[in-house]
Image (tube, rainbow, N blue to C red):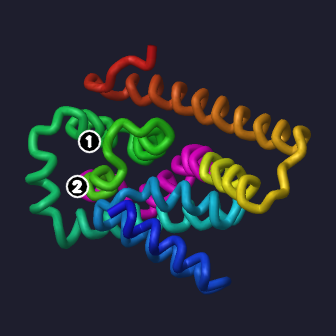
């Protein structure tokens, strides 16, 4: 499946501007269908660069998360309930949402403690409002998205340098490395703080220590 998505990325890259819309649609559909979106996330950085790649992944992930939420709430509720029956972590999150609402959605996006695709459907079973879920997911997914797109861009730059014959200068690599290190550190700190805050609202989540 990863190879299939990789091939789709190559095709999208050849589409020009229309490829942006195609990429967003492919990412959203992959979220709904439980496909490995990590391939698409890294690929966006490699193909489009950090800025455009981040925007595309962010849009696709948000649309996919919202579509899965609506499916779980209205059309696939029975199927989702069977998948999550007696799951202790989901029960803890559900209980926390009844008190904290969208804050718990935001924290679980900052510090993923549940498979992304399944969590999107699972939130459809909770009491959180759709607009609050959508906004909290959109904001909470930003740091992690930036990190993985940045890593994909770094890999893409390394491949281009090896095939084009034009090597980046030490200063360029240093600047890129500093940016990557800063992004990793920021995401790690944010995730650690989010996990602590989330643990304070549940009785199941492990300590971040």
As for residue 146 lying within the magenta part, the answer is: yes
Relative image position of residue 13 (x, y in whole percent): 60, 76
Residue 197 visible in the shown view: yes
**Secondary-structure class at tag 2:** helix
Eyeballing the image, is 121 above or below 104? Answer: below
Crowdedness of circle 2 by 10 Å Cα count: few (<14), some, many (20+)? Answer: many
Q: Residue at x 45, y 28 (%)?
A: 195
Query: Magenta region's main secondary structure?
Result: helix
Label 1: few (<14), some (14–19) or many (≥20) C-alpha neighbours in 10 Å: many
* Residue 10 painted magenta: no
The magenta-colored residue range is 124-149
Q: Report the side of 150 relative to 209 (left or right).
A: right
Q: Which mark is residue 94?
A: 1
In primary-sequence order, the first of circles 2 and 1 is 1
Above or below, 11 against 70 in this view is: below
Q: Give the Cα separation between the discs numbered 2 and 1.
A: 8 Å
The correct choice, above or below, for 106 with respect to 33 in the image is above
Residue 27 shows which numbered tag?
A: none
Q: Please give the residue where the numbered disc 2 appears in the rendered image.
A: 125
Q: Quadrant of the N terminus?
A: bottom left
Residue that lies at the very extreme toward the top in this rendered image: 209
Residue 72 is left or right of residue 134, and the answer is left
Whole-percent x, y for residue 198 in the image: 41, 30
Q: Nearer the viewer, residue 22 or 189?
A: 22
Image quadrant holding the C terminus, namely top left
Q: Identify the residue at horizontal 68%, vertical 38% (top origin).
A: 183
Q: Are marks 2 and 1 in contact (CB under 8 Å)?
A: yes
């Amino acid at each position: 499946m990863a190879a299939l998505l990789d091939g789709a990325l190559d095709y999208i890259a050849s589409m020009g501007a229309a490829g942006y819309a195609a990429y967003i649609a492919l990412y959203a559909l992959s979220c709904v269908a439980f496909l490995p979106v990590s391939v698409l996330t890294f690929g966006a950085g490699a193909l489009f660069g950090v800025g455009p790649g981040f925007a595309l992944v962010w849009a696709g992930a948000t649309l996919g998360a919202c579509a899965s939420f609506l499916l779980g709430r209205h059309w696939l509720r029975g199927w989702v309930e069977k998948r999550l029956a007696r799951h202790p972590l989901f029960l803890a999150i559900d209980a926390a949402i009844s008190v904290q609402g969208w804050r718990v959605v935001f924290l679980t996006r900052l510090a993923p403690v549940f498979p992304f695709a399944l969590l999107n459907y699972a939130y459809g079973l909770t009491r959180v409002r759709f607009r609050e879920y959508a906004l909290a997911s959109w904001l909470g997914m930003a740091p992690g998205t930036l990190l993985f797109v940045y890593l994909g861009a770094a890999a893409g730059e390394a491949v281009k340098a090896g095939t084009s014959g034009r090597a980046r200068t030490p200063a360029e690599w240093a600047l890129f490395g500093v940016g990557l290190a800063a992004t990793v550190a920021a995401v790690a700190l944010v995730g650690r703080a989010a996990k602590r805050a989330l643990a304070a609202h549940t009785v199941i989540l492990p300590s971040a220590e």
